[in-house]
Structures are given as structure tokens and as C-alpha cells.
Amino acid sequence: MKITNTHLTITISNLDKSIAFYASIGFTLEQRWENHYAQMRGPGIEIGLHPSVNVIATGASNMSIGLTVDDFEAASSNLKELGIAYSERSEEGGDFIHFADPDGNPLYIIKPKW
């Protein structure tokens, strides 16, 4: 498995407001999927903005590290071989593998459908 892209996803409450904020400090909007998700790029970093009032209200982590890999199935197998607990889900935007680092910081691997 080879990582082909890395990005940080930030859970936010208002997509339009967050896009405007990040644009004002130098990020460029790369792509937007209605009110579901926006991808922005700055020098040396890509961030995703994901609106979700429920996550913010519960006090859960507002950030996660997302990885795009060259072989999604191999990534799943690799986590299993390493004994790292993970869960898989599929939605309109893609297939996901969710897991955490030793301190509980959330990470995910995505196989995008775009």
C-alpha cells in the first residue's frame, strides 16, 4: 500500500462561512459537493471541511486525518495484519475505513467515488 494523498478533515458548523474564512487566509477552494463537503488547498496541505452540528455538539473530535491510498483493499488487510481495530462504511462520497492512533486521534482511508 502506498499513500497517494493526505488531508486533514475539519468538522465545522457552517460550510459557507468556513469556506470564506479559509479562503480569506490563503486557501483555495478545489471542489465542493453541495453542502456535504468542501476540499481546500493551501501551501503543503489539503483540508476538507465537513459540516456536522451533531459532532460538534457532542464534544467529539473536530478533526481527523484522511488518507487516499493506491490500494484500498490492501490498506484494509494491512490494518488487520497489524491488529489495528477499524470499521468500514460506504456512502455517497466513497468507501471509508475508520481507525485511530494510539491516543485515539481519528484517521480514515477513503476510496472516493468522484
Image: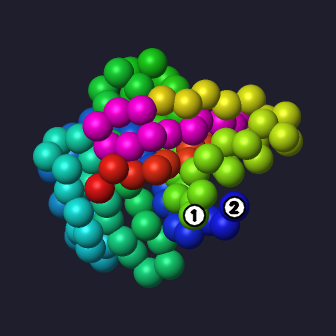
- Which residue has dot 2 on it? 1
What is the x, y in percent for residue 96? 50, 39
- Which residue has dot 1 on it? 70
Q: Amino acid at mark 2?
A: Met
Residue plotted at (73% across, 43% down): 77
Q: How many marks?
A: 2
- Spatial separation of the CA atoms under disc 1 and disc 2: 6 Å
- Mark 1: secondary structure: loop
* 2, above or below 62, in the image: below
Residue plotted at (26% across, 69% down): 30
Q: Which badge, 1 or 2, comes first in the chain's sequence?
A: 2
Q: Amino acid at mark 1?
A: Asp
What is the x, y in percent for residue 98? 59, 36
Q: In the drawing, does residue 32 fall left or right of residue 65?
A: left
Q: In the drawing, does residue 59 fall left or right of residue 23?
A: right
Nearer to us in this view, 25 or 30: 30
- Mark 2: secondary structure: loop
Quarter of image, res 79: top right
Instruction: Decide if residue 113 is in sight here.
Output: yes
Q: In the drawing, does residue 16 fall left or right of residue 73?
A: left
**Outermost residue toward the bottom in this view:** 43
Marks 1 and 2: CB-CB under 8 Å?
Answer: yes
Colour convention: rainbow
Residue 97 magenta-drawn? yes
Main SS, magenta region, reads: strand
Quarter of image, res 90: top left
Instruction: Decide if residue 65 is in sight here.
Output: no
Q: In the drawing, does residue 86 fall left or right of residue 57?
A: right
Q: Quadrant of the C terminus?
A: bottom left
What is the x, y in percent for residue 52? 32, 31
Residue plotted at (27% across, 47% down): 37
Q: Which residues are magenta?
A: 90-104
